[in-house]
Every structure is written in structure tokens, then in C-alpha cells.
Amino acid sequence: MSAVREWAASQDSKLLEAVAVNNLGKWKTATQMTALAILLATRDSSHGGAAFAVGSGVALLYTSAGLALWSLVVYMRKIWKVLLR
């Protein structure tokens, strides 16, 4: 997403406005950081009950990937609207 935003910023100020940071990206980052914290904390699976935590971390990581794709679609729609004018 950073590359898309950098490209848009170099093209036109209207494109830069179209790809302004939104809450979707912030939610993606929050889920990604939480997932990584959980996975790093449970990397030593000798502790009992770690399977649920690892599963939660993996689920959050997949959720983060889904939010990244969703964010890409949102950004690309906004970019196309500006480019097609």
C-alpha cells in the first residue's frame, strides 16, 4: 500500500487525496501487530494451552491479510475514479 500511495503522490495532488490514510489501514496494522505479538509470545510451545493462542495469532494474521486486500481494492477504486475523469 505504501508503494501505491507513493506512486499516487508523485502523479497528481488529486490522486494523493484519493489515497489518503483511512481507518481500514489502521485496523489492518492493529490486527497485524497483535497477531505478531501473540505468535512471538507463544513461539515456545512447551507452555500448556498455547495451541489456542497460536490459533488466535494465525487467525488474526489471516484477518490482517484480508484487510490489506480490502484496503487495496478501496484504494484502487478511488484511484480509478480520479484517473477516469
Image (cartoon, rainbow, N blue to C red):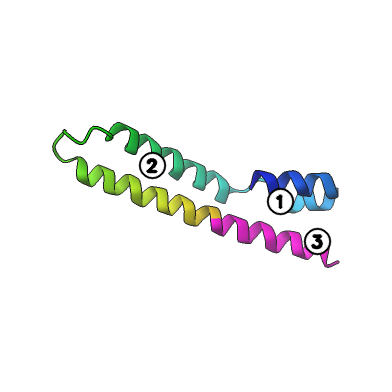
Disc 1 target residue: 19
Q: Residues within 10 Å of mark 1 (few under 14, many from 20)?
A: many
Q: Amino acid at mark 1?
A: Val
Q: Residue at x 62, y 48 (%)?
A: 22
Q: Quadrant of the C terminus?
A: bottom right
Drawn side of residue 35 relative to residue 44, left or right = right
Task: Point out which mark residue 35 bears.
Answer: 2
Q: Amino acid at mark 2?
A: Ala
Q: State the image coordinates of residue 62 (x, y, percent, origin top left).
A: 41, 53
Q: Residue at x 68, y 60 (%)?
A: 76
Residue 47, compared with residue 66, is above or below; it is above
> Is residue 39 rendered magenta in the image?
no
Q: Disc 1 on helix, strand or loop? A: loop
Q: Disc 2 on helix, strand or loop? A: helix
Disc 3 target residue: 82
Give the Cα separation between the discs numbered 3 and 1.
Answer: 10 Å
Q: Residue at x 55, y 57 (%)?
A: 69
Give the Cα separation between the discs numbered 2 and 3.
Answer: 35 Å
Name the outermost residue toward the left.
48
Q: State the image coordinates of residue 21 (x, y, percent, origin top left).
A: 65, 45
